[in-house]
Image: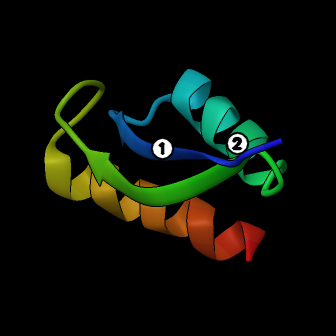
Amino acid sequence: MKQKYVLIDCDPGHDDVMAILSTIAHPDIFHILGITTVCGNNLVPLITENMLNVLHYIH
């Protein structure tokens, strides 16, 4: 199967984190070009820090 290239734009609440983890778990299907964070559950600096913590934890 040909990989799908994705750019993830998220806030990232728990639902977005689960979607990102599911995407990362399938590198044979998805090639993540990048992850951007936007205001949603909190302010962007805190959201970005949280996303970086999630990515650090899984790697």
- Find residue 17 and report its horizontal and vertical position in percent: 60, 38
Residue at the location (64% across, 31% down)?
19
Look at the picture and state if 13 lies above or below 58. above
Amino acid beneath label 2: Thr
Residue at the location (72% across, 53% down)?
24
What SS does tag 2 mark?
A: helix
In the visual, does 21 lie left or right of 43? Answer: right
In the visual, does 9 lie left or right of 33? Answer: left
- Find residue 50 and report its horizontal and vertical position in percent: 44, 56
Amino acid beneath label 1: Val
In the visual, does 54 lie left or right of 50? Answer: right
Residue at the location (36% across, 34% down)?
10
Give the label on residue 23, or none.
2
Given contact means CB atoms under 8 Å apart, are the residues at marks 1 and 2 in contact? yes
Give the label on residue 48, or none.
none
Using the numbered discs, state the Cα–Cα distance from disc 1 to disc 2 in whole angstroms: 9 Å
Look at the picture and state if 39 lies above or below 37. above
**Tag 1: Cα neighbours inside 10 Å, few (<14), some, or many (≥20)?**
few
Give the label on residue 6, or none.
1
Residue at the location (70% across, 70% down)?
57
Closer to the camera, 48 or 9? 9
- Find residue 11 and report its horizontal and vertical position in percent: 33, 33
